[in-house]
Image (cartoon, grey):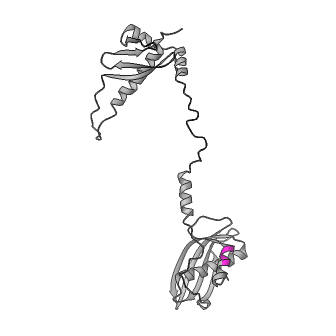
Amino acid sequence: MGAPRHSVRAATALVGAVLLLSSCGTEGGDGADARPRAKPAEVTTLVAGREGLSRARISTQSGEILILEEDGSVTTMDLDSAGGRDAFAVTEADLAALNANLDLDFAGLVATDLPPRKTAQQEALEAFAARTQPALPVLAEGAEIDPQVFLAVKVQPLNRGAGADLVEVTANLQRGVDADIAFSYATCALAGWARDNGNPYGRHVRTLQAERNGKLLIGSAFLLSDSKPMGLRVMETEETLRECDARGIPTA
């Protein structure tokens, strides 16, 4: 039948004792040179018996292990004796029995219907998408747009070839025009150009503004795409065209 019946239990107790004693040396104060706590006189652990788990106390000074048997009796074993050393000659059969005794079933303890957790990247992308603003700035309440302030506009691709997707809109307006109205003029002109060239989306990249010869000059760069891009300000061609018409801003 292999080793004595206490073999498996004694081996389990020894493992528990080693883990408990080793943890004493890792707990200390906050400083790097903190002294470890003194080891306890005895430690308590559980050992695997034939009918379940039994309690055992291991003396850290005398080297004795006291095992509480299933019938209530206590078995004393000197770990440094020949019998004690022989008890720890654990066979493969003993290990298999120990594994069977310690086989725990966690079924039902973990919920299976929890929604999948989002990754940090997914959360960051959602947070950035939530910052997206309309293509046209929200004008101040009561603001009126005078069609006479719009002088001229030009859309020019900045890269060449069939896949040209970076364009710049240059718009001229009368001096003193509100910056949001000036940007709206450039965006509406882009929407008209994008419709004629089959571009459904445009992401705003940057806008430069200057005054020259008594006029306001706007230079806005956009990156065109076939699918809706991420960005702080994204132009959807058809929706932007409708908004430009509603505000009375030219689109060509």
Q: What are the residue bounds of the magenta stretch? A: 238-242
Check if residue 241 falls in the magenta segment.
Answer: yes
Using the rendered view, name the quadrant where residue 26 is placed: top left
Name the residue: 41% across, 15% down.
Answer: 67
* Count of numbered circles in the view: 0
Q: Is residue 79 left or right of residue 240?
A: left
Q: Residue at x 46, y 14 (%)?
A: 70
199 or 177, nearer to the observer: 177
Q: Residue at x 54, y 17 (%)?
A: 97
Q: Residue at the location (37% across, 19% down)?
A: 57
What x and y, as percent, mark residue 190?
64, 77
Q: Is residue 201 above or below residue 19?
A: below
Q: Does 105 sit above or below residue 120?
A: above
Pinpoint residue 79: horizontal percent, then vertical percent. Answer: 37, 13
Q: Quadrant of the C terminus?
A: bottom right
Between 153 and 146, the one nearer to me in the picture:
146
Counting from the top left corner in percent of width and height, residue 12 is at 45, 20
The percent position of residue 10, horizontal first and vertical second, equals 43, 16
What secondary structure predominates along the stretch shown in magenta?
A: helix
